[in-house]
Image (tube, grey):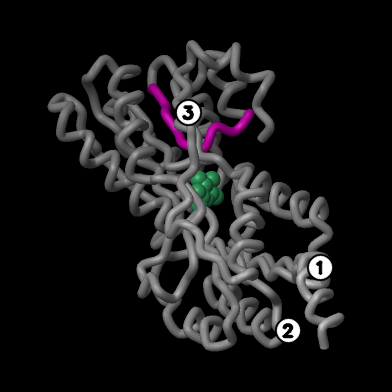
Amino acid sequence: AQASEAAAPSTEAAKKLVIGFAQVGAESAWRTAETQSIKDEAAKRGYDLKFSDAQQKQENQIKAIRSFIQQKVDAIVVAPAVSSGWDTVFKEAQDAKIPVILVDRGVDCDPSLYSTFIGSDFIEEGKNACIELAKAMGEKGNIVELQGSVGASAATDRQKGFAEELKNHPDLKIIKTQSGDFARAKGKEVMESFLKSDGKNIQGVYAHNDDMGMGAIQAIEEAGLKPGVDIKIVGVDGIKDAFQAMVDGKYNATVECNPLLGPQVFDAAETLVKGGTVEKWIKSQEGIYPADKAQEALPNRVY
Ligand code: GYE
Protein backbone atom coordinates (compact mmCIF):
# COMPACT_ATOMS: atom_id res chain seq x y z
CA ALA A 1 0.00 0.00 0.00
CA GLN A 2 2.85 2.33 0.84
CA ALA A 3 4.50 1.88 -2.50
CA SER A 4 1.34 2.66 -4.43
CA GLU A 5 0.70 5.73 -2.25
CA ALA A 6 4.16 7.03 -3.03
CA ALA A 7 3.66 6.42 -6.71
CA ALA A 8 0.31 8.12 -6.89
CA PRO A 9 1.38 11.76 -7.22
CA SER A 10 3.84 11.17 -10.04
CA THR A 11 1.34 9.01 -11.93
CA GLU A 12 -1.19 11.79 -11.52
CA ALA A 13 1.29 14.42 -12.75
CA ALA A 14 2.22 12.33 -15.77
CA LYS A 15 -1.38 11.63 -16.71
CA LYS A 16 -2.14 13.25 -20.01
CA LEU A 17 -5.30 15.27 -19.82
CA VAL A 18 -8.25 14.62 -22.06
CA ILE A 19 -9.98 17.90 -22.89
CA GLY A 20 -13.16 18.51 -24.86
CA PHE A 21 -13.37 21.84 -26.69
CA ALA A 22 -16.77 22.95 -27.99
CA GLN A 23 -15.81 25.71 -30.43
CA VAL A 24 -18.40 28.03 -32.05
CA GLY A 25 -17.20 27.75 -35.63
CA ALA A 26 -14.76 29.48 -37.95
CA GLU A 27 -16.55 32.75 -38.75
CA SER A 28 -13.58 35.09 -38.37
CA ALA A 29 -9.80 35.33 -38.55
CA TRP A 30 -9.90 35.89 -34.80
CA ARG A 31 -11.62 32.58 -34.16
CA THR A 32 -9.30 30.68 -36.48
CA ALA A 33 -6.39 32.10 -34.49
CA GLU A 34 -8.03 31.02 -31.23
CA THR A 35 -8.61 27.46 -32.47
CA GLN A 36 -4.98 27.28 -33.58
CA SER A 37 -3.73 28.57 -30.22
CA ILE A 38 -5.73 25.95 -28.34
CA LYS A 39 -4.72 23.10 -30.67
CA ASP A 40 -1.05 24.10 -30.57
CA GLU A 41 -0.97 24.37 -26.81
CA ALA A 42 -2.74 21.00 -26.39
CA ALA A 43 -0.19 19.36 -28.69
CA LYS A 44 2.67 21.02 -26.81
CA ARG A 45 1.42 19.61 -23.52
CA GLY A 46 0.67 16.18 -24.95
CA TYR A 47 -3.06 16.42 -24.20
CA ASP A 48 -5.73 14.48 -26.00
CA LEU A 49 -7.91 17.30 -27.39
CA LYS A 50 -11.39 16.44 -28.59
CA PHE A 51 -12.33 19.30 -30.90
CA SER A 52 -15.86 20.06 -32.05
CA ASP A 53 -16.88 22.81 -34.49
CA ALA A 54 -20.54 23.77 -33.84
CA GLN A 55 -21.05 25.69 -37.11
CA GLN A 56 -22.45 28.62 -35.10
CA LYS A 57 -25.21 26.54 -33.49
CA GLN A 58 -25.64 26.29 -29.74
CA GLU A 59 -27.52 23.00 -30.11
CA ASN A 60 -24.41 21.47 -31.66
CA GLN A 61 -22.31 22.74 -28.77
CA ILE A 62 -24.72 21.18 -26.29
CA LYS A 63 -24.52 17.86 -28.16
CA ALA A 64 -20.71 18.04 -28.12
CA ILE A 65 -20.66 18.75 -24.38
CA ARG A 66 -22.93 15.77 -23.70
CA SER A 67 -20.63 13.55 -25.71
CA PHE A 68 -17.59 14.88 -23.80
CA ILE A 69 -19.37 14.01 -20.54
CA GLN A 70 -20.05 10.50 -21.81
CA GLN A 71 -16.40 10.11 -22.75
CA LYS A 72 -15.47 11.21 -19.21
CA VAL A 73 -13.05 13.94 -20.29
CA ASP A 74 -11.02 15.70 -17.59
CA ALA A 75 -12.29 19.18 -18.46
CA ILE A 76 -14.65 20.85 -20.91
CA VAL A 77 -13.80 24.11 -22.67
CA VAL A 78 -16.66 26.02 -24.32
CA ALA A 79 -16.75 29.20 -26.40
CA PRO A 80 -20.48 29.86 -25.94
CA ALA A 81 -22.18 30.86 -29.20
CA VAL A 82 -24.84 32.74 -27.25
CA SER A 83 -25.04 33.72 -23.60
CA SER A 84 -28.32 32.08 -22.55
CA GLY A 85 -29.53 28.49 -22.31
CA TRP A 86 -26.60 26.73 -20.65
CA ASP A 87 -27.92 25.81 -17.20
CA THR A 88 -29.09 22.26 -17.93
CA VAL A 89 -26.02 20.99 -19.76
CA PHE A 90 -23.56 22.72 -17.41
CA LYS A 91 -25.40 21.09 -14.50
CA GLU A 92 -24.89 17.72 -16.19
CA ALA A 93 -21.15 18.40 -16.39
CA GLN A 94 -21.09 19.48 -12.77
CA ASP A 95 -22.91 16.32 -11.68
CA ALA A 96 -20.27 14.33 -13.57
CA LYS A 97 -17.60 16.36 -11.68
CA ILE A 98 -16.10 17.73 -14.89
CA PRO A 99 -14.99 21.37 -14.70
CA VAL A 100 -16.37 23.73 -17.36
CA ILE A 101 -14.07 26.49 -18.60
CA LEU A 102 -15.62 29.30 -20.64
CA VAL A 103 -13.34 30.76 -23.22
CA ASP A 104 -13.74 34.08 -25.07
CA ARG A 105 -17.50 34.59 -24.57
CA GLY A 106 -19.56 34.80 -21.40
CA VAL A 107 -22.89 33.28 -20.31
CA ASP A 108 -25.77 34.46 -18.15
CA CYS A 109 -26.39 31.22 -16.24
CA ASP A 110 -25.84 30.52 -12.54
CA PRO A 111 -22.10 31.26 -12.07
CA SER A 112 -21.61 28.25 -9.81
CA LEU A 113 -22.16 26.04 -12.87
CA TYR A 114 -18.82 26.94 -14.47
CA SER A 115 -15.31 27.31 -13.10
CA THR A 116 -13.98 30.36 -14.87
CA PHE A 117 -14.37 32.72 -17.82
CA ILE A 118 -11.15 33.39 -19.72
CA GLY A 119 -11.52 36.37 -22.03
CA SER A 120 -11.99 40.05 -22.64
CA ASP A 121 -13.97 42.92 -21.18
CA PHE A 122 -16.28 43.61 -24.13
CA ILE A 123 -17.89 46.65 -22.53
CA GLU A 124 -14.46 48.22 -22.24
CA GLU A 125 -13.73 47.32 -25.88
CA GLY A 126 -16.98 48.98 -26.98
CA LYS A 127 -16.14 52.15 -25.05
CA ASN A 128 -12.65 52.29 -26.54
CA ALA A 129 -14.02 51.72 -30.04
CA CYS A 130 -16.35 54.68 -29.52
CA ILE A 131 -13.53 56.93 -28.32
CA GLU A 132 -11.42 56.02 -31.37
CA LEU A 133 -14.28 56.47 -33.83
CA ALA A 134 -15.18 59.84 -32.27
CA LYS A 135 -11.59 61.02 -32.73
CA ALA A 136 -11.46 59.81 -36.34
CA MET A 137 -14.80 61.53 -37.12
CA GLY A 138 -13.83 64.80 -35.47
CA GLU A 139 -16.57 64.28 -32.85
CA LYS A 140 -19.30 64.80 -35.44
CA GLY A 141 -21.59 62.78 -37.72
CA ASN A 142 -23.72 59.70 -38.27
CA ILE A 143 -22.59 56.18 -37.47
CA VAL A 144 -23.80 52.80 -38.69
CA GLU A 145 -23.15 49.75 -36.53
CA LEU A 146 -22.32 46.25 -37.74
CA GLN A 147 -23.25 44.00 -34.87
CA GLY A 148 -21.78 40.60 -34.09
CA SER A 149 -23.83 37.43 -33.80
CA VAL A 150 -27.18 37.98 -32.13
CA GLY A 151 -27.16 36.83 -28.50
CA ALA A 152 -23.36 36.46 -28.25
CA SER A 153 -21.93 38.23 -25.20
CA ALA A 154 -19.19 39.74 -27.37
CA ALA A 155 -21.89 41.46 -29.46
CA THR A 156 -24.27 42.46 -26.66
CA ASP A 157 -21.52 44.02 -24.55
CA ARG A 158 -19.65 45.70 -27.39
CA GLN A 159 -22.92 47.36 -28.29
CA LYS A 160 -23.59 48.34 -24.67
CA GLY A 161 -20.11 49.78 -24.03
CA PHE A 162 -20.18 51.82 -27.22
CA ALA A 163 -23.66 53.17 -26.47
CA GLU A 164 -22.61 54.18 -22.94
CA GLU A 165 -19.56 56.06 -24.17
CA LEU A 166 -21.58 57.69 -26.95
CA LYS A 167 -23.40 59.76 -24.32
CA ASN A 168 -20.15 61.73 -23.91
CA HIS A 169 -20.15 62.66 -27.61
CA PRO A 170 -23.27 64.76 -28.22
CA ASP A 171 -22.73 65.33 -31.97
CA LEU A 172 -22.35 61.66 -32.84
CA LYS A 173 -25.34 59.49 -33.56
CA ILE A 174 -26.01 55.86 -34.49
CA ILE A 175 -28.49 55.90 -37.38
CA LYS A 176 -28.59 52.18 -38.27
CA THR A 177 -27.59 48.96 -36.56
CA GLN A 178 -27.77 45.38 -37.81
CA SER A 179 -26.04 42.06 -37.31
CA GLY A 180 -23.39 40.95 -39.78
CA ASP A 181 -22.78 37.77 -37.75
CA PHE A 182 -19.08 38.52 -37.13
CA ALA A 183 -18.41 37.47 -40.76
CA ARG A 184 -16.76 39.35 -43.61
CA ALA A 185 -19.26 38.53 -46.38
CA LYS A 186 -22.26 39.28 -44.16
CA GLY A 187 -20.66 42.53 -42.97
CA LYS A 188 -20.23 43.58 -46.58
CA GLU A 189 -23.84 42.72 -47.38
CA VAL A 190 -25.22 44.72 -44.45
CA MET A 191 -22.98 47.67 -45.28
CA GLU A 192 -24.23 47.60 -48.88
CA SER A 193 -27.81 47.89 -47.65
CA PHE A 194 -26.85 50.75 -45.30
CA LEU A 195 -25.16 52.57 -48.19
CA LYS A 196 -28.19 52.04 -50.40
CA SER A 197 -30.60 53.54 -47.88
CA ASP A 198 -28.42 56.18 -46.18
CA GLY A 199 -25.34 56.56 -48.40
CA LYS A 200 -24.64 60.28 -48.16
CA ASN A 201 -25.60 60.40 -44.49
CA ILE A 202 -22.98 57.99 -43.18
CA GLN A 203 -19.72 59.32 -41.78
CA GLY A 204 -18.66 56.42 -39.59
CA VAL A 205 -18.82 52.63 -39.19
CA TYR A 206 -18.53 50.77 -35.91
CA ALA A 207 -17.84 47.09 -36.64
CA HIS A 208 -18.04 44.66 -33.71
CA ASN A 209 -15.13 42.81 -35.30
CA ASP A 210 -12.49 43.53 -37.92
CA ASP A 211 -13.75 40.91 -40.36
CA MET A 212 -17.02 42.85 -40.75
CA GLY A 213 -14.92 46.02 -40.95
CA MET A 214 -13.06 44.46 -43.91
CA GLY A 215 -16.42 43.70 -45.51
CA ALA A 216 -17.44 47.34 -44.99
CA ILE A 217 -14.27 48.52 -46.77
CA GLN A 218 -15.24 46.49 -49.84
CA ALA A 219 -18.82 47.76 -49.84
CA ILE A 220 -17.71 51.40 -49.48
CA GLU A 221 -15.19 51.07 -52.31
CA GLU A 222 -17.76 49.44 -54.57
CA ALA A 223 -20.08 52.38 -53.85
CA GLY A 224 -17.36 54.70 -55.20
CA LEU A 225 -16.39 56.15 -51.83
CA LYS A 226 -13.10 56.10 -49.92
CA PRO A 227 -13.10 53.92 -46.78
CA GLY A 228 -11.08 55.46 -43.94
CA VAL A 229 -11.50 58.90 -45.52
CA ASP A 230 -15.08 59.60 -46.67
CA ILE A 231 -16.38 57.09 -44.14
CA LYS A 232 -14.30 56.37 -41.06
CA ILE A 233 -14.18 52.77 -39.78
CA VAL A 234 -13.28 51.34 -36.39
CA GLY A 235 -13.38 47.65 -35.46
CA VAL A 236 -12.44 45.21 -32.71
CA ASP A 237 -9.99 42.22 -32.65
CA GLY A 238 -6.71 43.49 -34.09
CA ILE A 239 -6.33 41.03 -36.98
CA LYS A 240 -3.45 41.49 -39.45
CA ASP A 241 -5.81 42.54 -42.26
CA ALA A 242 -7.00 45.46 -40.13
CA PHE A 243 -3.42 46.62 -39.59
CA GLN A 244 -2.74 46.34 -43.33
CA ALA A 245 -5.92 48.30 -44.09
CA MET A 246 -4.79 51.04 -41.68
CA VAL A 247 -1.37 51.18 -43.35
CA ASP A 248 -3.26 51.53 -46.66
CA GLY A 249 -5.30 54.42 -45.25
CA LYS A 250 -8.62 52.54 -45.43
CA TYR A 251 -9.30 51.85 -41.75
CA ASN A 252 -9.04 54.12 -38.76
CA ALA A 253 -8.51 52.03 -35.63
CA THR A 254 -8.80 48.59 -34.13
CA VAL A 255 -9.35 47.70 -30.49
CA GLU A 256 -7.43 44.56 -29.71
CA CYS A 257 -9.12 41.39 -28.40
CA ASN A 258 -6.70 38.56 -27.68
CA PRO A 259 -7.51 35.15 -29.25
CA LEU A 260 -4.26 33.46 -28.17
CA LEU A 261 -5.81 31.90 -25.10
CA GLY A 262 -4.47 28.31 -25.27
CA PRO A 263 -1.83 28.63 -22.53
CA GLN A 264 -4.21 30.31 -20.06
CA VAL A 265 -6.99 27.83 -20.78
CA PHE A 266 -4.81 24.80 -20.06
CA ASP A 267 -3.10 26.35 -17.04
CA ALA A 268 -6.58 26.75 -15.59
CA ALA A 269 -7.57 23.21 -16.63
CA GLU A 270 -4.53 21.72 -14.89
CA THR A 271 -5.25 23.60 -11.68
CA LEU A 272 -8.91 22.61 -11.71
CA VAL A 273 -8.24 18.95 -12.47
CA LYS A 274 -5.91 18.87 -9.45
CA GLY A 275 -8.76 20.22 -7.34
CA GLY A 276 -7.46 23.78 -7.11
CA THR A 277 -9.38 26.99 -7.75
CA VAL A 278 -8.83 29.76 -10.29
CA GLU A 279 -10.13 33.32 -10.66
CA LYS A 280 -13.75 33.49 -11.82
CA TRP A 281 -12.74 35.86 -14.60
CA ILE A 282 -9.24 35.64 -16.09
CA LYS A 283 -9.20 38.88 -18.00
CA SER A 284 -7.20 39.48 -21.18
CA GLN A 285 -4.74 42.35 -21.47
CA GLU A 286 -5.19 44.19 -24.74
CA GLY A 287 -4.13 47.32 -26.62
CA ILE A 288 -5.75 50.01 -28.76
CA TYR A 289 -4.34 50.75 -32.20
CA PRO A 290 -5.24 53.90 -34.09
CA ALA A 291 -4.02 54.06 -37.72
CA ASP A 292 -0.87 56.02 -36.87
CA LYS A 293 0.44 53.09 -34.80
CA ALA A 294 -0.32 50.45 -37.45
CA GLN A 295 2.88 50.57 -39.50
CA GLU A 296 5.06 49.97 -36.49
CA ALA A 297 2.85 47.24 -35.02
CA LEU A 298 2.10 45.25 -38.20
CA PRO A 299 5.30 43.12 -38.35
CA ASN A 300 4.68 41.85 -34.82
CA ARG A 301 1.06 40.81 -35.26
CA VAL A 302 0.68 37.04 -35.00
CA TYR A 303 -2.95 36.70 -36.10
O1 GYE B 1 -14.28 39.26 -31.58
C1 GYE B 1 -15.03 37.78 -33.23
C2 GYE B 1 -15.48 36.41 -33.14
O2 GYE B 1 -16.13 35.93 -29.16
C3 GYE B 1 -14.47 37.52 -28.75
O3 GYE B 1 -16.05 36.27 -31.87
C4 GYE B 1 -15.07 36.60 -29.73
C5 GYE B 1 -15.52 37.24 -31.03
C6 GYE B 1 -14.46 37.93 -31.85
O4 GYE B 1 -15.82 35.72 -34.18
O5 GYE B 1 -14.16 38.06 -34.26
| Kind of residue sitting beneath label 1 | Ser
Span colored in magenta: 232-240
Looking at marks 2 and 1 on the same chain, the residue that comes earlier in the sequence is marked by 1
Query: What is the number of the mark on residue 10?
Result: 1
Please name the residue shown 40% across and 74% down the image: 112
Q: Residue furthest left?
A: 170
Question: Could you tell me if the residues under marks 2 and 3 are in contact, i.e. CB atoms within 8 Å?
Answer: no
Of the 4 image quadrants, the one containing the C terminus is: top right
Classify mark 3 as within 8 Å of ligand 1 or not, answering yes or no. Answer: no
In the image, residue 296 sits, relative to residue 176, either above or below, namely above
Mark 2 = which residue? 71
Mark 3 = which residue? 287
Question: What secondary structure is found at the residue carrying circle 1?
Answer: helix
Q: Quadrant of residue 201?
A: top left
Query: What is the number of the mark on residue 98?
Result: none
Question: What secondary structure is found at the residue carrying circle 2?
Answer: loop
